[in-house]
Amino acid sequence: MTTSDGRRALVVGAGIFGVTAALELRARGLDVTLLDPGPLPHPLAESTDISKVIRLDYGADDLAMALMETALDGWRQWNARWNADGGRSLFHECGVAFLTRTPMALGAVAAPDGHPLGGFEAESYQALLRRGHAPQRLGAAEIHARYPAWREGAFVDGYFNPEGGWAESGAVVATLAREAESRGVRLCRGLTCAGLLERGARVAGVVTREGATLEADHVVVAAGTWTPRLLPHLGGALRSVGQPVFHLAPRDPSPFGTARFPVFGADIAQTGYYGFPVQPNGVVKIANHGVGRDVDPGDVASANSELGAPERVVSAAEVEALRAFLRDTFPGLVDAPIVGTRLCVYGDMWDEQFLIARDPERAGLTVAAGGSGHAFKFAPVLGGLIADATLGVPHPALERFAWRPLRAAAPGEAARHHG
């Protein structure tokens, strides 16, 4: 019979939840195994892309902004460490512009259900000022002068926040996975979790499709959009939602450089559209953070999205919606070739808040899922939160991310377009 001192941890899934959890659990002295079918970064994972937004801006949500203040410092520290270790910065702090088609309603307060009466941008702007930050208010004239790629007069208000930018998300996951291995985490690539190893009311490990049994005292399921397949009892709370991502190649890239085209949200809670400055390869990425559509996430063991996830295809209607947005917003991109598309599949929690909690009915099991399209930016604090939940260490944020009953309605994440 195998004995243990309670220090064995097994993390299922090496996306941003899983890899940060593995690093932190190892830092706390546990013997950690990280399981993923690979390759890393996994091509179907929500974390995987050329870029993700890093923003403090969360409407009137003080808890999220406070967590992001800590996370932003963490991103800067990661850059310093990566550079000191002979690597390079993977977080690019170019600032974030949130612009609106109508004047911001400053002074309005949040409604009882949490929706900002003044709009996401107004609530964020006021919260930033209240917390000691220095966002720069922009009117129509300033917007046109600073950002010539934007259609003149289409956006009349908003602000630029110099604190924030974007991260090379796929490269971040790969870098953190290498760090985890270098610090003693056993990274099991090529193994696919098939289910839990349960002994009575306790989870004692997992079994894999390949026939392996991996035992542990603490099992953390961080399987992203595939979590309900491993934990069917979460099927009503978590769903797979596809959001279109586009890579465009402007014929003239000069207006889309960082100085004149920072990370942006284009009246984001009303349109869903956000994007990034031009990349070294000449690509401008624009995506939608909106209602999305239910999709089958595909087979996690397949690294080929066409074979393993046939539903992950951007539709003709989504392309036409993008073109309509470009006509109204960015004249210089109207005729830009679309050189790449991707359906980013969110692991969407019913209330768009993360689930980081012990399973109350299964001892030894912690779930870290429900990224809902906005978890990556919290990467420097995610591992600590997951380790706290796993080891029973109190943290104020874990009250929000706790195991919770499914309800019919919820306010949702402030920046997201809800139709």
Image (cartoon, helix red, strand yellow):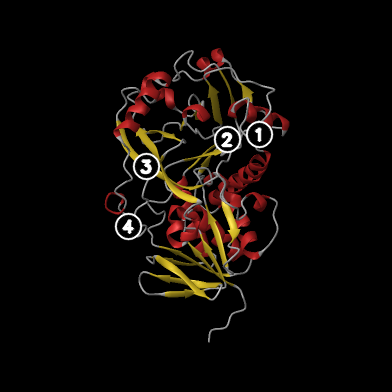
Mark 4 sits on what residue? 302
Q: Residue 13: in sight, yes or no? A: no
Q: Position of residue 279 (x, y in %)?
A: 41, 35
Residue at 47%, 61% in the rendered image: 231
Q: Nearer the viewer, mark 1 or mark 4?
A: 1
Q: Quick one: which residue is furthest to the left in this view?
A: 307
What's the CA distance linking mark 1 and mark 4?
40 Å
Labelled pair 1, 2 in contact (Cβ < 8 Å):
yes
Q: Quick one: which residue is furthest to the bottom in this view?
A: 1
Tell me the quarter of the picture where residue 344 sits.
top left
Q: Earlier in the sequence, mark 4 or mark 2?
A: 4
Instruction: Name the amino acid type tagged 1.
Output: Ala
Q: Which mark is residue 343?
A: 3
Q: Nearer the viewer, mark 4 or mark 2?
A: 2
Above/below status of 35 relative to 52: below
What's the CA distance linking mark 4 and mark 3?
16 Å
Q: Which mark is residue 338?
A: none
Instruction: Name the amino acid type tagged 2.
Output: Ala
Q: Earlier in the sequence, mark 4 or mark 3?
A: 4
Mark 2 sits on what residue? 414
Instruction: Name the amino acid type tagged 4.
Output: Ser
What's the CA distance linking mark 3 and mark 2?
22 Å
Labelled pair 3, 2 in contact (Cβ < 8 Å):
no
Q: Nearer the viewer, mark 3 or mark 2?
A: 2
What's the CA distance linking mark 4 and mark 2?
34 Å
Disc 4 element: loop
Mark 1 sits on what residue? 60
Residue at 63%, 35% in the rendered image: 114
Above/below status of 106 relative to 273: above
**Camera-nearest residue between 208 and 360:** 360
**Camera-nearest residue between 319 and 230:** 230
